[in-house]
Image (spheres, rainbow, N blue to C red):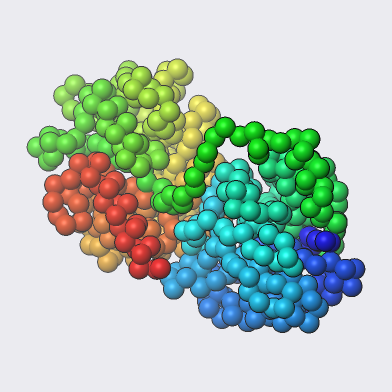
Amino acid sequence: MRIAAAQFAPTANPESNLARIEALAAEAAAADVSILVLPEEAMAHTGDVAGSLAPVAERSWARFRDGLAAVSTRHRIALIASGLEPSGGRRPFNTMLAVDLDGRIAGSYRKLHLYDAFAYQESARVQPGDALPPVVELAGRAVGLLNCYDLRFPELSRALVDGGAEVLAVSAAWMRGRRKEDHWSTLLRARAIENTIWVVASGSACEECVAGSAIVDPMGVVVADAGEAPLAWCSAEVARERTAEVRRALPALANRRIAASYAVTRSLFVKAAVNGGRSRDETPHVPLAPEEIAAEAAAAVHDGAAVVHAHARTPDGAQTIDPEHIAALVRAVRKRDPGIVVGTTTGLWTCEGHDDRMAKIAAWPQEWLPDFASVAFCEDGAAEAAQAIVDRGMTLESAVWSMADVPALLASPTLHDNVRVLIEPLDEDPVRAVADCREMAEALRAGGVTAPLLYHGLEGSTWAVVRAAIEDGAEVRVGIEDVTVDERGELASNRMQIAEALRIHDELRAVRE
């Protein structure tokens, strides 16, 4: 059977993209191609869509789906392409459709792994799927579906192979960048080699993407490649006999000694802010000494936190960024578990002003540097402090507390060095705090911020802001620094707050489903 991978540069106009797809399908069908794989965002290039993607999905998804079915029927060719499917919320799904020769929808797949990497956050505009991709039957072949970033998760490809896939079909908009082109070609070959399976990959030819559509055989040989052309397709005879031949010589699947099972985990990123400036009078659960903070950090990560934010404290309980206390905090966490990602504040309330802050950051021991540090752009000298964090080799988080802080952050030289940008509304009224979060988020995105955004509220606004963050695809921060109670108003430890955030996530997901 001949299978092809096509590449073109989708626009924001679904109708023109469907016309391009039909032209490619007609060419491929005339060359006796049975299955044509098309790129991610084949329905609409999201980079050309301002604001929410939901209106595009609601307006065009059904037409795109039905248009693919009509093209398949007219040209007797199976198609695989991705588009924006309505989710019922603020963010649509990035969904792959598999349409058989007769126009029947053989299956669909809502992208599981959203591209929240390399200072980009797809989840800010797209809702992640909650189910493993299917193996669909197209033109008599069992085809497993992968969407772009999925390629970096080998267990997903293995799940498809274990599910009976004979071919892995990849739709991608693989971003350009240092090493990324090499990652694309290497990972395509790796997925083919480790699974002894055919891989057919289509790459978007938009300006920011690598294109590079290719077909790789089960031994990892690239048998067809469309290169970097803005409009092209490549094809190959995808033979079952070749798969059998390779598996006789390389019976890696048969030689496996590991039985694996596959389940989809939660997609929520939680930061645990374990102490801040809280006292024991406010809550008995607050950790103060380095060993207490380390134990709390380990418990938080065990319960689902991705990273931990902690404030070093002096023996009398004051917050500090003095080198000796920062070193003691980090050393205790590393001793407890060197895999914990721990960060701290650089707030001016922890020192005697900006000059003192800069001197203290410069004096933090290299051996015991935090993994990341946060800089509030409402403070004097924030841009210089942010640069110091980057220069010391730590990961930077920048924070905005109000719209007044946004211009300073957007003008900062370290804007694109941020691992995430924190949105921290000061208003404790839940409705106003959520509105402030969304206003700041919109301004940051409009200003060119592509890094993940993290919302966190304060006291009475905390849980409303958590709900808004989950709805908006932002990262979440909870913990004793921000609030001492759960959503019901009952005293809650850091671990209980993490459980509460995960409960809210599952509740909102159940509503969507």
Compared with residue 226, is residue 219 higher up or lower down, i.e. above or below?
above
Classify residue 229 as left or right of residue 88. right
Q: Is there any visible trace of residue 20 in the rendered image?
A: no
Q: Nearer the viewer, residue 428 or 263?
A: 263
Q: How many marks?
A: 0
Q: Quadrant of residue 354?
A: top left
Compared with residue 389, is residue 106 higher up or lower down, i.e. above or below?
below
Q: Residue at x 13, y 51 (%)?
A: 490
Q: Quadrant of residue 376?
A: top left
Q: Position of residue 345 (x, y in %)?
A: 35, 35
Q: Residue at x 16, y 57 (%)?
A: 488
Q: Residue furthest right?
A: 31
Classify residue 162 as left or right of residue 459. right
Q: Position of residue 333 (x, y in %)?
A: 34, 24
Q: Residue at x 27, y 28 (%)?
A: 295
Classify residue 209 as left or right of residue 408. right
Q: Position of residue 293 (x, y in %)?
A: 27, 28
Q: Nearer the viewer, residue 127 or 379?
A: 127
Q: Nearer the viewer, residue 487 or 148?
A: 148
Q: Position of residue 342 (x, y in %)?
A: 39, 32
